Image (spheres, grey):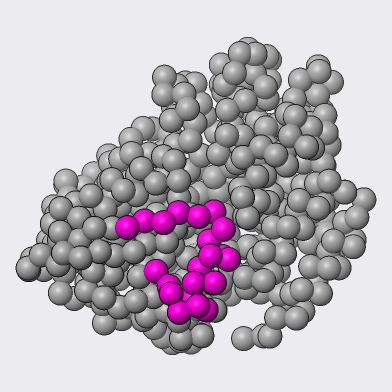
Amino acid sequence: MPHKPLDCEAVCTVLKRRAFAALAVVFLSGLASLPAFVDHPIASGAQPGPRLGGTVSVLGVWGGSELESFLAMVGPFEQRTGTKVEFEGTRDINAVLTTRVRGGNPPDVAGLPGPGQLAEFARAGKLIPLNRTMDLQALNRQYAREWIDLATVGGQLYGVFIKAAVKGLIWYDPKAFHAAGYAVPRTWDEMVALSDHIAQQGRAPWCIGLESGAASGWPATDWIENIMLRTAGPVVYTRWYRHEIAWTTPAVRRAWALFGKIAGTPRYVYGGIQGELAMNFGESPFGLFTDPPGCYLHHQASFIQDFILKQYPALQPIVDVNFFMFPPIDPGVPATVEVAGDLFGMFRSTPQARALIAYLATPEAQTIWVKRGGALAPNRIVAPQDYPDPLMRQVAQILSAADRVRFDASDLMPQVVNSAFLSATLDYVQHPDRLDQILAKLEQVAAGVPKR
């Protein structure tokens, strides 16, 4: 991978227990407290020196508690360097970043939409390689190889992951759940049966929120991806996002249809279809914790715990809020964990930008966000005891113990396909009977993207 353009087949084939064994050691073993980032240099020139001053512009998707955590993360960097981090947030990161890059006015540093888009910017000569900015030997010691490979194009490192998440978690309120007489489903069929049982009682089994500004629909892609992993399996999943199989293939169509069984059934969803389309993803789990509950199940990645606890700070993890893994669907399909991560790249090579991106990769920086909740650290030096509660430590253990891992498929697709995928899910939720036309249109979009 480091010696050729981004080849996610190779990356995702090696994301197995062997690759994550080192992560398991870190997550499950107690490590000493971490010194300052200058004592763990990842950038050449990251040793103590004169204060830089000036500013560094950062474009990212975060708002609310996520932005608060990022600003806390860069606080020590600003204090030591005298450099002000000027953050601009937008949920329409694809369009805003592409427009600014094309207009010759990119930010110094940006949170990239995903490895697929990173590769596009890198091949177009818009991103600055980080091989001379980062100490690659130190980076290899502190990161699992897979995180590095996902940010490598043509043998050059173009990005660093600064936080990660495990996807495919089903969240619930244990007290309300068990008080209603419900049991955690062990299979997809049991989960559908439970949904039907709850709906027959006149209650909404699911809270689903697909609204996210210009990125609306991405929570639906996570559903489809996790279903693909549990029906078609990880090999076909990889062929799908690489467009080695068509969107109209029966395996892909089936994943959409199973998603529609939940999200396209109005009585299964709190607020019905229109509520599902209008509800913001960050607010969508709140119905789990109202009295009486608005719903009993919510599918979302590990980061949603931070949204929940910010809204309901009195909740105790495991006691009042918990999750179970997305259940298996077809027997014999190997269990696979879907992951995602926030990936940063540098568009302007200034001293301030180089220093910031080096700092963001350090254990000190990532520990700050981890302690605040809602994030996993790609840097494997971050200690297990730095996770704020047993629930997040449990998520970290799931990642470290996984036999098979795949990165978020939509984030690995070309930008035009990614955008079409998001939009198509919204169309499908409203018009499940149009599935064949929707998939045919997606296939047309994907077929128009030149092969790399």
Q: Nearer the viewer, residue 166 or 279?
A: 279
The question of residue 92 being in magenta is answered with yes
Figure check: 103 above or below 168: below
> Where residue 314 sits: x, y (%)?
41, 19
Q: Is residue 426 visible?
A: yes
> Where residue 222 sits: x, y (%)?
64, 51
**Quadrant of the image occupied by residue 53:** bottom left
Q: Nearer the viewer, residue 68 or 27?
A: 68
Classify the position of the C terminus by image quarter. bottom right
The residue located at (58%, 28%) in the rendering is 286
The question of residue 299 being in magenta is answered with no
The residue located at (39%, 83%) in the rendering is 156
> Where residue 423 sits: x, y (%)?
73, 57
**Quadrant of the image occupied by residue 108:** bottom left
The residue located at (70%, 81%) in the rendering is 449
* In this rendering, position of residue 167 left or right of residue 390: right
Figure check: 191 above or below 247: above
Residue numbers of the magenta segment:
86-107
**Quadrant of the image occupied by residue 395:** top left
Q: Is residue 26 visible?
A: no
The residue located at (30%, 78%) in the rendering is 349
Most distant residue in the right direction: 433
* In this rendering, position of residue 445 left or right of residue 210: right
Figure check: 255 above or below 386: below
Question: Across the whole image, how many numbered discs are drawn on residues?
Answer: 0
> Where residue 114 sits: x, y (%)?
52, 65
Q: Nearer the viewer, residue 316 or 159?
A: 159
* In this rendering, position of residue 323 left or right of residue 243: left
